[in-house]
Image (cartoon, rainbow, N blue to C red):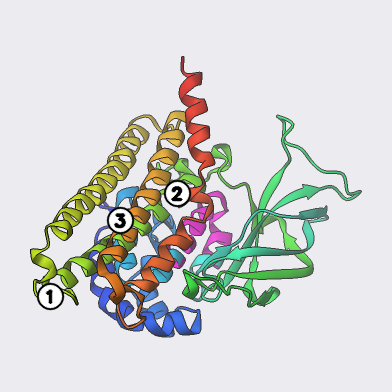
Amino acid sequence: MNATPGVGLVERARAIAPLIAREADEIERSRRLTPAVVSALIENGLYRALLPQSLGGAEAPIDIFMQMLEEIAKADASTAWCLGQCSVCAMIAASLDHDTAHKIFNEGPGILAWGAIAHGARATEGGYRVTARWDFASGSRQASWLGAHVRIVDAEGTPRNNADGSPEVRTILFPVASAVLHDVWQAIGLAGTGTDAYEVSDLFIPERFTAFRDVPSALRETGPLYRIGTGSTFSLGFAAVSLGVARATLDAAIALSRAKHQSLAASAMRDNQAVLGLIGRTEGDLRAARAYLYATANAMWRDLCATGEFSAAHRSAVRLAATWTIHQSAKVVDAAYHMAGATAVFRSNPFERRFRDMHAITQQIQARDTHYEDVGKAILAEG
């Protein structure tokens, strides 16, 4: 076992960031990560950040994973989003038998992507059969395997339930060659993620290529990382992506302010008191958001490592911090975009794509305003 899980991931992310930045225009144009970027991510082991050490993964502490995504997001948000999505998908390995997980993650590129929960799979001898189409599979164009979260029905078509009466939902896994991918991701931001749709027709899924996602009793790995579950890990990861986008956008505005003269004034932006005040306030907002997110993640991680429990209070705290951080990051990007003036609208400058990417992030499930309502309900229930 690696005595220091995740060592070097942040440094490797930082080292390949210039390559990713150079490829960002082509990623945007083609709406796909370029082969050079995918190769760099694979060769540096970044897709394996959350894969169990028993399978040769890093099984990194949560803050290392978040910092890795931040560094990549500073170079290109679409690359960071795909990396975050596929890295979290790899956590399903902790609920698979070792041989099955080895086949998925240690043969070929070993990249798994999946979309939103939808549809059902019919139980049959030795596994399940499914005909369905799913959306929102970020990273699917780089993946060697796809997954889907489906409700299970028995051979007669009756929905199966868990012991507590809730619907039985499994994650099914299958080679990307078994599916048809549909090019549907024509979006204003995160264009390079290739968040396309995919479908299968009468596909048989052997039992061993299914798992219960985010069910602690189904885990085969004992590491604290897998107690967090994919939902909260997605939240922390994508909040870190938003911080990276915000940091890069504000840094670009600061660099512009050092050099730019206003068109109707002889003075430089750096001498404009309004600009100076805006930079100071925005920098404070960004630092505060980052500190809050990481403080929440680190406090949760310490408790988790000490007790082995990811509690409802932890889940609520993570959800609040991640949602608020994404919203604050968007405010930082908006301020930087506004600060840049007309310069910001040109594709040749480092503002308009990040502006679009950031506002695509705010539309994702991790940034929904309803999360505040859930947290508020939890707070009131404590009394």
Q: Is residue 368 left or right of residue 246?
A: right
Residue 282 pos. (x, y %):
23, 53
> Which residue is labeled 2 in the image?
235
> Which residue is labeled 1 in the image?
259
Q: Is residue 57 left or right of residue 274?
A: right
The answer to whether residue 78 of the structure is visible from this angle is yes
Q: Is residue 323 magenta?
A: no
- Circle on res. 49: none
Residue 315 lies, with reference to residue 342, above or below; the image says above
Q: Residues within 10 Å of mark 1 (few under 14, many from 20)?
A: few
Tell me where the magenta segment starts and ends, as one range: 82-103
**Residue type highlighted by circle 3:** Val
**Residue type highlighted by circle 1:** Ala
Q: CA distance from mark 2 to mark 3?
A: 19 Å
* Residue mark closest to the camera, 1 vs 2: 1
Q: Is residue 92 magenta?
A: yes
